[in-house]
Amino acid sequence: MKLITFTVPCYNSAEYMRHCIDTLLTAGEEAEILIINDGSTKDNTAEIADEYAAKYPTIVRAIHQENGGHGEGVNQGIRNAKGLYFKVVDSDDWLDTIALKRVMDRIRSFVKEGKRVDLFLANYVYQHPDGPGHIMKYGNVFPKDKICTWDDTKAFGPSQYLMMHSVIFRTKVVRASGVVLPKHTFYVDNLFLYAPLPLCKTIYYMDENLYRYFIGREDQSIQENVMVKRIDQQYRVTMLVTDLFDMKSIQKQSRKLARVLYHHISLMITITAVYLYVANTPEKLQMCKTMWEKIKEKDPSLYRHMKYNSLSGWTTIPGVPGRKLSVSVYRLSQKIFGFNT
């Protein structure tokens, strides 16, 4: 039995994908690595994928598809995964091999003991070309090294958030959520993260710096100039996330789970609004107005929470001064807390 499936979406990734895959191979025969070649044409990504599949036939599978974007690469992984657990690792990122060994040991022990964990969490590191940067930890939110539920958790700090990099889902939970990521759309990792969370009944947090999230390429999706160009896609994903659940039902299930989801939605709305303001065209400003109108129409209680009790409330201050203040507060928060930097 494969304990875990690593899905590695690759698009013209020949320059850096080997490093990523080599770190995953240290998990050994209990791991499955799906290299998803997303229609690469500018380099030999496809050949490298086939090379690894031929060299490690019991661990690596190369899957070639027409270009569908990062989300379709993840979809392909979900469809083909044979591992008990599922993790996405972007081809320009990698896993710390010492931390990976400890995570694999823990998963293995729980399987032998018959203990079910739906969601494993670990830290991730903003990895810059000149060395590690900010580390996203969760020890103040989740009990360390203890199987828990959402009701055992504490509130996230204003600068804390879950990302795809921090999660390892039970594969059945991901499939049960029914999540299908839209093609040719950036920022869909938010949807992948968000959809399965209400189905995760048991959680286990390890204070290990597992995921190395490389920051520094000029064309990266989180660079400000890139986010402004792709703000329509960020907007689309944000609206998909806000439409995903009936928050009243989530509150009945677990008020602390609802708190986690409110926090995540608030961050998404804040980022979307800020970059719509940075774009500063009549069309983008109207999109921001429309976003708030749709949220209010769908779920008035969610609207009130977002407007009056969260970070996103900063973005509703009217007029040019309000927009400038929102952008300034966001950029200051980046510098103070180190996120996306």
Image (cartoon, helix red, strand yellow):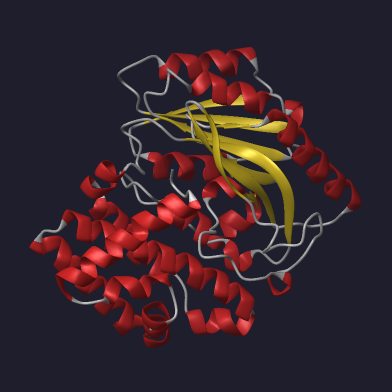
Above or below, comparing residue 271 to residue 293 in the picture = above
Residue at (74% x, 31% y) in the render: 98
Quadrant position of residue 44: top left
Depth order, front residue of 333/26: 333
Image-based side of 313 in relation to 88, left or right: left
Residue at (39% x, 83% y) in the render: 308
Residue at (29% x, 65% y) in the render: 326
Image-based side of 29 in relation to 60, left or right: right
Above or below, comparing residue 166 to residue 247 in the picture = above
Where residue 268 sits in the image (x, y, percent)? 39, 62
Above or below, comparing residue 208 to residue 196 in the picture = above
Above or below, comparing residue 158 to residue 302 in the picture = above
Farthest residue, direction left: 282
Q: In which quarter of the image is the N terminus?
A: top right
Residue at (73% x, 36% y) in the render: 99
Depth order, front residue of 304/232: 304
Where residue 139 sits in the image (x, y, percent)? 70, 57
Depth order, front residue of 329/70: 329
Is any part of residue 98 visible from this angle? yes
